[in-house]
Image (cartoon, rainbow, N blue to C red):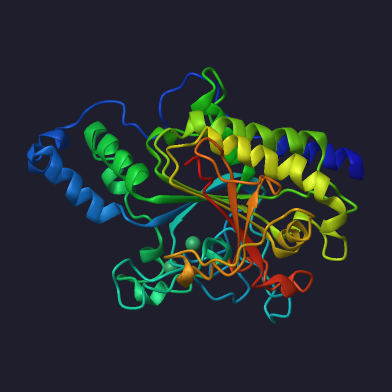
């Protein structure tokens, strides 16, 4: 097959397989069962909630959906050692291995999920220090604290609740409510993110899953977006999707109290100058984020991380006041020291104004092992909740 035909065929195969609306939730059992008569479901509602929350809540959960080959296994991984979750979807194979990997199947749209093991369990000794979300590499197999969580590898890295979900309709609904209302969800596949936001905010949209975002309280997302300075800039469509996401969040996530958006360090290439592109940064990033923030009063903590070079360029804009303040409680996350506000030239903070507080921080860089971006390892910026005071 000629390359172009082959490419077109691959693109056709990679089209997002959204379900037509309306639909029945994917995992809901079709009928109630005798399980619903079990003693567990006769317990008072609040007791059931506490048990389910202890079993399945209070964690960060990765949910992934992308076009990819099947996961490696110990047989196909060419001697690759199992890591967090076994062989998660973004594991890369060291080509220097003596034993080459075996071909392991055609690409298809595939789901994956795991519990985040980036940090120690809440309340455990050492939990005062947290790797921030931008350090996360669970989908690449690096759960920094797998050893601190109870259970055996790799099963303890998985959610391990499919059995409960399939017990009966009541069990499914109870558990799904607990999962989405008491865990933080971590999403880094844009087709999944866009599909979920649309299906929840726009009635009649195609559906990507039965996942109900209306109960979500905490969400971390990675938005890959090239803003400037690259030979492969974002397209008009990329920018439209970016703006659409910001527009849909308030409607799709009405219960959200914590939101973090990680703009990858690929936002621009390192040898281009953010200072020469501030107009673009304001137009495409800051103003839309500020506008979105005004519609998200229910979100107590709203964090965006962007590369430090952009922050430093903002500081040098004439009229920008740099406030050398620390943020109480943010110290352990490495946030503090330098503080500016957006809009940059707003003279005073009024009762009615809405601003973005921009803090120079040390959020880390998830692409730390990429030589192109290693220099910005400790240099991203956190944009903390606008003060609609
Ligand atoms: Zn993780
Ligand atoms: Zn793990």
User: What is the tally of numbered marks visible in this picture?
Assistant: 0
Report x, y in % for residue 299: 45, 42
Residue 307 to residue 108: above or below: below
Asked whether, in this view, residue 232 is left or right of residue 172, the answer is right
Residue 248 to residue 324: above or below: above
Asked whether, in this view, residue 83 is left or right of residue 345, the answer is left
Which residue is located at x 61 percent, y 62 percent? 323
Location of ligand 2 given as a quarter of the image? bottom left
Tell me if I can see residue 42 in this picture.
Answer: yes
| Depth order, front residue of 380/276 | 276
Quarter of the image with the N terminus is top right
Asked whether, in this view, residue 180 is left or right of residue 80, the answer is left
Residue 282 to residue 81: above or below: above
Report x, y in % for residue 147: 39, 77
Tell me if I can see residue 196 in this picture.
Answer: no
Which residue is located at x 67 percent, y 66 percent? 367
Asked whether, in this view, residue 122 is left or right of residue 369, the answer is left
Report x, y in % for residue 291: 62, 35
């Amino acid at each position: 097959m000629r390359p172009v035909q082959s490419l077109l065929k691959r693109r056709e195969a990679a089209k997002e397989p959204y379900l037509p609306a309306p639909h029945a939730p994917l995992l809901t059992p079709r009928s109630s069962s005798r399980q619903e008569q079990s003693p567990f479901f006769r317990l008072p509602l609040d007791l059931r909630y506490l048990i389910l929350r202890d079993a399945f809540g209070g964690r960060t959960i990765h949910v992934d959906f992308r076009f990819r080959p099947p996961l490696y296994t110990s047989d196909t991984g060419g001697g690759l050692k199992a890591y967090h979750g076994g062989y998660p979807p973004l594991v890369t194979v060291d080509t220097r291995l003596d034993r080459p990997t075996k071909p392991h199947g055609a690409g298809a749209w595939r789901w994956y999920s795991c519990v985040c093991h980036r940090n120690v369990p809440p309340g455990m000794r050492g939990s005062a220090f947290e790797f921030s979300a931008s350090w996360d590499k669970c989908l690449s197999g690096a759960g920094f604290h797998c050893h601190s969580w109870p259970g055996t590898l790799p099963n303890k890295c998985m959610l391990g609740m499919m059995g409960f979900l399939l017990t009966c309709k009541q069990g499914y609904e109870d558990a799904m409510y607990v999962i989405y209302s008491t865990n933080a969800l971590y999403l880094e596949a844009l087709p999944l993110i866009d599909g979920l936001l649309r299906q929840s905010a726009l009635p009649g949209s195609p559906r990507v899953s039965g996942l109900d975002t209306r109960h979500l309280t905490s969400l971390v997302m990675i938005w890959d977006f090239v803003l400037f300075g690259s030979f492969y800039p974002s397209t008009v469509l990329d920018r439209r999707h970016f703006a659409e996401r910001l527009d849909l969040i308030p409607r799709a996530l009405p219960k959200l109290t914590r939101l973090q958006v990680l703009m990858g360090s690929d936002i621009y290439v390192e040898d281009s100058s953010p200072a020469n592109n501030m107009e673009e940064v304001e137009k495409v990033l800051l103003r839309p984020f500020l506008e979105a923030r005004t519609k998200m009063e229910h979100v107590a903590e709203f964090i965006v991380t962007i590369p430090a070079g952009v922050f430093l360029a903002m500081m040098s804009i004439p009229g920008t006041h740099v406030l050398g303040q620390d943020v109480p409680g943010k110290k352990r996350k490495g946030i503090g020291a330098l503080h500016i506000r957006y809009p940059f030239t707003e003279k005073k903070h009024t009762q009615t104004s809405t601003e973005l507080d921009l803090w120079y921080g040390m959020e880390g860089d998830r692409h730390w092992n990429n030589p192109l971006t290693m220099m910005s390892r400790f240099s991203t910026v956190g944009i903390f909740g606008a003060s609609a005071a």
